[in-house]
Amino acid sequence: MNKYEMVIITNSDITDKQKRLVINKIEEFIATNGKITKTDDLGIKKLAYEVKKHSTGHYYVTEFELENSKVLELEKLCRITEEILKFIVVKK
């Protein structure tokens, strides 16, 4: 398994319950296929530029271990989730 770090920016206009559901869905996928080593909720921050007509976003950072083949599935899950404005997965 390889070590990765992922930053997710969600829409800051959605409710806390909706944010938690989105993050739980991502964390559940990682936990099922690998292991989460660290999570951090950075809160709402101003974006450098508008993304999908939003100027602020809620930032989450997750460090995890996952098989290389499952990273593409994780990225696909993030792409189809409407509440996620931006995300990036980086191999450590």
Image (cartoon, helix red, strand yellow):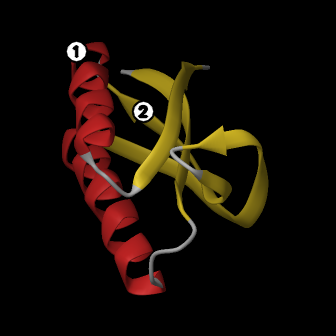
What amino acid type should be assigned to the residue bearing mark 1?
Ser
Amino acid type shown at disc 2: Glu
Image mark for residue 69 = 1
Labels 2 & 1 near each other (Cβ < 8 A): no
Query: Which residue is at 36% across, 77% downward?
Result: 18
In the depicted view, which residue is nearer to us: 53 or 58? Answer: 53
Give the left or right position of residue 75, taking residue 59 as reference: left
Give neighbour class at mark 2: few <14, some 14-19, many 20+ (Cα, 10 Å). many
Q: Please tell me whether mark 1 sits on a helix, a strand or a loop.
A: helix
Which residue is found at the position 48% from the left and 46% from the top? 85
Tag nearer the camera, 2 or 1 = 1
> In the image, what residue occupies the spot 31% across and 35% down?
79
Q: Quadrant of the C terminus?
A: top right
- Please name the residue that numbered disc 2 is placed on: 65
Task: List x then y, in percent, for residue 38.
Answer: 58, 52
- Residue 76 figure quarter: top left
Q: Is residue 10 left or right of residue 34?
A: right
Task: Say the numbered circle drawn on residue 46.
Answer: none
10 to 77, vertically: above or below: below
Above or below residue 28? Residue 32 is: above
Q: Toward which corner of the image does residue 51 lie, by quadrant?
A: top right
Q: Nearer the viewer, residue 23 or 50?
A: 50
Image location (x, y in percent) of residue 12: 57, 68
Disc 1 residue crowd, few under 14, some 14–19, many 20+, Cα 10 Å: few
Front-most of 71 and 49?
49
Q: Is residue 20 above or below residue 70?
A: below
Residue 9, image x and y in percent?
Answer: 56, 50
User: What's the CA distance linking mark 2 and mark 1?
Assistant: 12 Å
Q: Secondary structure at mark 2?
A: strand
> Where the N terminus falls, by quadrant?
top left
In this image, 14 relative to 78: left or right? right
Q: Residue at x 57, y 57 (%)?
A: 39
